[in-house]
Image (cartoon, rainbow, N blue to C red):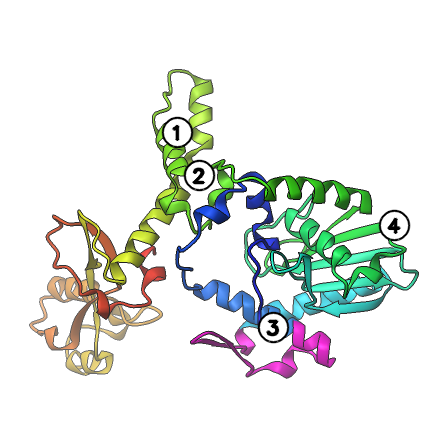
């Protein structure tokens, strides 16, 4: 079972930049994991099982990863990513002559308060090099240099009674991020125990503070939609002028940050409306409906003896109702295909209360947070 502490590796960067985020996030429900996060967790589990049991990824085809009430199956379609990660991890073992390793050790810097699980912790045969590895299965490149995430794991593994003996003779600490979706796959950075000392000092200072400092690190923070300081910073950015090129550049640099904040706000508003919490001025509606064929064979049969040819009806698949109706009109074919068409919405979305579309009953749309944002 995955264990989570108040301060962990994945939030280390945010903790250093904005120590007050934890207090701000108290009593805010955790958002459900999306499909990409679940797939990433599945790949992590596959790597864990391979290293623990001495298996190859293809031997785990069919394994079902479960997280809460959600399940995802490891299939041949995604085997490639796990194969790449597995190969690169074993190359790291050879490169640094790893003789002792721990898979998913749960380490704590401050018991019950600060720590987390390291994907792979390895020690070289001469006990002078410690390898700390993190798998990432997303497509946005994660930087390894000065990684607060890996520094926290380093500090925690050095302090934890179960792993501190691995540090006795260590002179070099290697941070490794194995990321199959990006060019180069493995990113490496070498540091020292002294640098871990410096990081730990900075972290301890942050843990004694409740300072709120909004910025790019707000992304994924549970408190972002409710944080007054974050809202104020975004409003201030929006009020920036563009009287000259320098101001324009300054404003442009904030565009992504503002967009991320707006997305976070919309997601949280949607989630609360789904839960039945009223938000004045907003409701949930179905997205614009599009037409598609309900019976392609029936359409083909209906047009079999007309001037409409197969090449008119199919591209790589049957053309859309709108396109085929246009061809029928051009060729003056008197065939009504309405019985083969269904009209359906692609999902639900957030809309102002005065939108002409009818509001959707919240209880009918549980689980649509991801499709709302697409």
Q: Nearer the viewer, mark 2 or mark 4?
A: 4
Query: Which residue in the structure is indicated by mark 2?
Result: 257
Q: Can residue 308 be seen in this view?
A: yes
Mark found first going from the N terminus, 1 or 2: 1
Helix, strand, or loop for circle 1? helix
Percent of width and height locating residue 287:
22, 59
Using the rendered image of the protein, determine whether residue 192 is visible from the camera's viewpoint: no
Residue 45 bears which disc, if any? Answer: 3
Viewer-closest of 54 and 205: 205
Establish if 78 lies above or below 118: below
Mark 2: give few (<14), some (14-19) or many (20+) Cα within 10 Å.
Answer: some
Whichever of labels 1 and 4 marks the residue nearer the N terminus, that label is: 4
How far apart are the alpha carbons under marks 1 and 2? Answer: 9 Å
Q: Identify the residue at horizontal 58%, vertical 66% (top origin).
A: 3
Q: How far apart are marks 3 and 1 (CA)?
A: 41 Å
Q: Identify the residue under disc 1.
A: 237
Q: In this view, does 28 lie to the left or right of 122?
A: left
Answer left or right for 61 relative to 225. Answer: right
Q: What element carries label 2?
A: helix
Q: Of the residues under marks 3 and 4, which one precedes in the sequence?
A: 3
Along the line of sight, the residue nearer the viewer: 58 or 100: 100
Give the percent coordinates (x, y) of residue 46. 62, 74
Q: Are circles 1 and 2 on residues that touch, CB within 8 Å?
A: yes
Label 2 to label 4: alpha-carbon separation = 39 Å
Report the span colored magenta: 48-77
Q: Helix, strand or loop at disc 4? A: loop
Residue ID at (10%, 52%): 356
The local crowd at label 3, few if under 14, some if 14 to 19, many if 20 or more residues have their Cα within 10 Å, is: some
Q: Is the C terminus in the top left, top right, bottom left or bottom right quadrant?
A: bottom left
Q: Say what secondary structure mark 3 lies in.
A: helix
What numbered label is drawn on residue 171? 4
Tell me residue 289's x, y (percent): 19, 62
């Amino acid at each position: 079972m995955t264990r989570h502490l108040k301060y962990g590796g994945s939030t280390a960067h945010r903790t250093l930049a904005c120590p007050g985020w934890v207090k701000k996030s108290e009593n805010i429900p955790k958002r459900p994991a999306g499909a990409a996060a679940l797939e990433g967790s599945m790949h992590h589990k596959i790597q864990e099982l391979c290293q623990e049991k001495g298996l190859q990824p293809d031997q785990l085809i069919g394994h079902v990863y479960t997280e809460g009430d959600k399940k995802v199956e490891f299939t041949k379609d995604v085997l490639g990513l796990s194969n790449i990660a597995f190969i690169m991890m074993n190359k790291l073992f050879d490169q640094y002559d790893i003789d002792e390793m721990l898979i998913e050790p749960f380490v704590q810097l401050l018991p019950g308060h600060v720590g987390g699980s390291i994907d792979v912790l390895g020690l070289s045969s001469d006990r002078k090099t410690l390898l700390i590895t993190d798998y990432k299965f997303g497509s946005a490149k994660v930087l390894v240099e000065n990684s607060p995430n890996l520094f926290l794991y380093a500090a925690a593994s050095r302090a934890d009674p179960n792993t501190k003996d691995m540090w006795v003779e260590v002179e070099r600490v290697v941070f490794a991020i194995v990321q199959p979706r990006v060019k180069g796959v493995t990113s490496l950075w070498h540091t020292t125990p002294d640098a871990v000392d410096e990081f730990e000092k900075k972290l301890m200072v942050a843990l004694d503070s409740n300072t709120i400092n909004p910025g790019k690190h707000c992304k994924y923070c549970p408190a972002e939609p409710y944080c007054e300081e974050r809202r104020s910073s975004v409003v201030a950015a929006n009020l920036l002028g563009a009287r000259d090129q320098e101001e324009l550049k300054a404003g442009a640099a904030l565009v992504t940050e503002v967009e991320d904040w707006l997305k976070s706000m919309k997601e949280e508003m949607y989630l609360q409306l789904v839960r039945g919490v009223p938000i004045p001025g907003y409701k949930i509606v179905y997205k614009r409906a599009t037409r598609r064929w309900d019976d392609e064979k029936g359409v083909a049969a209906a047009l079999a003896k007309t001037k409409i040819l197969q090449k008119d009806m199919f591209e790589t698949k049957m053309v859309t109702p709108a396109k085929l109706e246009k061809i029928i009109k051009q060729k003056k074919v008197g065939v009504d295909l309405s019985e083969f068409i269904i009209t359906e919405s692609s999902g639900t979305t957030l809309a102002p209360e005065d939108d002409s579309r009818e509001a959707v009953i919240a209880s009918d749309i549980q689980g649509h947070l991801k499709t709302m944002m697409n």
